[in-house]
Amino acid sequence: MAGKNRKGYVANIQVGEPSADEVVAAGNGHGSAVGKGVEIGGPVGDRKILRRHIPEYPAWAEEKGISAIVKIFFTVRPDGTIRHSVRIVHSSGYTELDSLAKEAILAWRFSPTRASSSSEEAWGVITFRFTLA
């Protein structure tokens, strides 16, 4: 999955990093999903993504040729929204890139749980890769 900035550079985004053992069909309880350039591991993988937001690769990072990774632990509520208590588990080393990644995941929406299914929250880890294409 990629988001372009104003000059056409790409912020490549890969979601999650499940091991080979964890890559399974969504909905089987293991919580992994594989899609077009997207991987989500953990229990949140059982939920369909309704809306995603890809952060723009900032001009200052482009000018400096910066490539960085930000990993964020997040929790999805039963209604499909993201709890604001996201936590960076791997910083890019750049506060602005970390902030862009946090803002992006907070804009994502997942399918709500059905009344007949669990009303518990689900967690996941998303990896944003900021690189020049």
Image: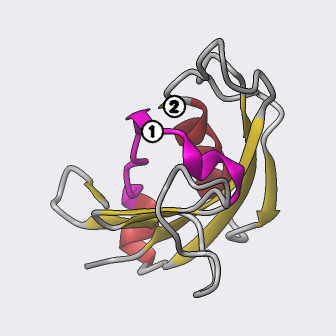
Which residue has dot 1 on it? 48
What is the spatial separation of the Cα atoms under label 2 and label 1, in whole angstroms?
A: 6 Å
Would you say 16 lies left or right of 131 here?
Answer: right
Closest to the observer, 57 or 24: 24
**Point 37% across, 71% down: residue:** 63
Residue 68 image offset from top left, x and y in percent = 56, 75
Three-letter amino acid code at the position of disc 2: Phe
Residue 124 image offset from top left, x and y in percent = 70, 52
Residue at the outermost front position: 116
Residue 107 image offset from top left, x and y in percent = 52, 29
Locate residue 8: give its quadrant.
bottom left
Q: Residues within 10 Å of mark 2 (few under 14, many from 20)?
A: many
Residue 109 image offset from top left, x and y in percent = 50, 28
Under circle 1, the secondary element is: loop
Q: Do the CB atoms of the residues marked 2 and 1 lie less than 8 Å apart?
A: yes
> In this view of the protein, can residue 101 be seen by the observer?
no
Q: What stretch of residues is rendered in magenta?
A: 42-59
Closest to the observer, 99 or 27: 27
Q: Residues within 10 Å of mark 1 (few under 14, many from 20)?
A: some
Which residue has dot 2 on it? 110
Question: Considering only order in the chain, which callout, 1 or 2, is on the residue closer to the N terminus?
Answer: 1
Q: Is residue 131 above or below residue 114?
A: below
Under circle 2, the secondary element is: strand
